[in-house]
Image (cartoon, helix red, strand yellow):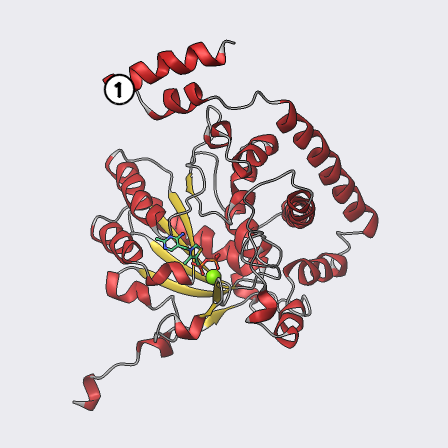
């Protein structure tokens, strides 16, 4: 029997292009990005780091509501999104607001989403995305459906969805990848493995040695990627996109990453389940530090340019929060109108009541 027993996890080695020192270790897989594109990727990651810092500060000042920190995950989030096109459809989880912003959601609307305002969930015309999903794994099912629609209509586009390590223990995760697999749906399933589901460590989440190997049961392609390496994440996502469009089926990408901050700003204290040694171990792998070294070595990046991005981000955030403050408060009637195409009788009555109240 021994010759038929198979250890699947041995097949899943972590894919890396850029090591912690910013040196290329996998020349053959170096993505075909121009100097300008490499710089743009860096700008977006730096911008996103600042957005995270400012969002945390705004939350502490009581000016933002729900917020899930992103620092540490920039390569997983921004470099994967960088491999996508405008016509691709994004189905993010609550931590994936940065990808939505780079997909076209205006910053002030991201702030309104944080405050629970319905306008934060309304994608502008041409922005192909759903708002961030709070229910773990639900967007995987939706992505399978969107990707299947694209396949049936012969679209050169993909549905891209994100979840965390914890999300891969959810039934929806398996149903989504299985269904997408059987129909060769145009899907990219990204798992950002940041080591924890709130306080639950990855090892207590599943016996599987890698999360990428979960692709095997669905019969789809899977890869584990260094999620702190923007070039590896980009290359893997680009590959997944190309094969999905050709009808070769979906792909599962596990990115090995870390969130420096708390789970969300709603009272999580990571010092209760993480050591400062672990934090500093991961800080050494930082995607921005690593990419900066790589770009500086090529003579493509200066401190001055970085400061310009930082200033631009701060200014955009100031403007956006002002705009969010000035945006009309949501009314009960807005809520009802945005939920229903046709109102049931009881809500028609309530609608009249609220209209009268709100006009006072
Ligand atoms: C279906 C469901 N169950 C439980 C929760 C509560 N919950 C919110 S976040 C979270 C942990 C998710 O961890 P992971 O998937 O690793 O994502 P991360 O927050 O680390 O990005 C849980 C259990 C939820 N939102 N939805
Ligand atoms: Mg996690």
Residue 82 spot, x, y in % from top left: 54, 46
Q: Is residue 174 left or right of residue 286?
A: left
Quarter placement of the N terminus:
bottom left
| Residue at point 44%, 20% (across, down) | 334
Front-lying residue, 68 or 99 = 68
Q: Is mark 1 within 8 Å of ligand 1?
A: no
Secondary structure at numbered mark 1: helix
| Residue at point 42%, 46% (across, down) | 134
Q: Residue furthest left?
A: 1
Which quarter of the picture shows residue 261? bottom right
| Residue at point 54%, 44% (across, down) | 66
Residue 93 spot, x, y in % from top left: 44, 48
- Tally of numbered tags: 1
Front-lying residue, 31 or 227 = 227
Vertical comparison of 91 with 190: above or below: above
Residue 85 spot, x, y in % from top left: 48, 39
Q: Is residue 115 left or right of residue 253?
A: right
Q: Is residue 25 visible?
A: no
Q: Residue furthest right?
A: 304
Front-lying residue, 30 or 269 = 269
Which quarter of the picture shows residue 55? top right
| Residue at point 77%, 48% (across, down) | 306
Q: Where does label 1 land, which residue?
A: 346
């Amino acid at each position: 029997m021994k010759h038929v027993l198979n250890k699947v996890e041995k097949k899943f080695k972590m894919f890396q292009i850029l090591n912690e020192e910013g040196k290329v270790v996998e020349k053959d897989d170096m993505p075909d990005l121009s100097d300008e594109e490499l710089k743009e990727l860096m700008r977006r990651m730096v911008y996103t780091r600042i957005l995270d810092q400012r969002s945390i500060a705004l939350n502490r000042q009581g000016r933002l509501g729900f917020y899930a920190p992103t620092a540490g995950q920039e390569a997983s989030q921004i470099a994967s999104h960088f491999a996508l096109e405008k016509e691709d459809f994004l189905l993010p989880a609550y931590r994936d607001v940065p990808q939505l912003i780079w997909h076209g959601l205006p910053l002030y609307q991201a702030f309104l989403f944080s405050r629970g305002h319905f306008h934060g969930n309304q994608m502008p015309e041409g922005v192909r995305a759903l708002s961030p999903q709070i229910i773990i794994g639900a967007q995987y099912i939706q992505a399978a459906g969107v990707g299947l629609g694209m396949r049936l209509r012969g679209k050169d586009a993909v549905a891209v969805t994100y979840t965390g390590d914890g999300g891969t223990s959810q039934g929806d995760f398996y149903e989504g990848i299985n269904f997408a697999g059987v129909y060769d749906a145009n899907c990219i399933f990204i798992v950002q493995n940041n080591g924890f589901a709130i306080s639950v460590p990855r090892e207590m989440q599943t016996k599987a040695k890698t999360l990428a190997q979960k692709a095997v049961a669905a019969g789809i392609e899977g890869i584990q990627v260094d999620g702190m390496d923007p070039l590896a994440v980009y290359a893997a996502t680009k590959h997944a996109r190309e094969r999905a469009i050709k009808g070769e089926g979906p792909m599962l990408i596990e990115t090995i990453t870390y969130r420096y901050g708390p789970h969300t700003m709603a009272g999580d204290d990571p010092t209760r389940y993480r050591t400062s040694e672990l934090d500093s171990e991961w800080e050494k792998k930082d995607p921005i530090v690593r990419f900066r070294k790589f770009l500086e070595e090529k003579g493509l990046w200066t401190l001055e340019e970085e400061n310009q991005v930082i200033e631009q981000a701060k200014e955009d955030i100031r403007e956006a929060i002002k705009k969010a403050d000035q945006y009309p408060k949501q009314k009960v009637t807005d809520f009802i109108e945005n939920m229903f195409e046709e109102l049931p009788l009881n809500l028609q009555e309530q609608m009249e009541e609220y209209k009268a109240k709100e006009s006072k």
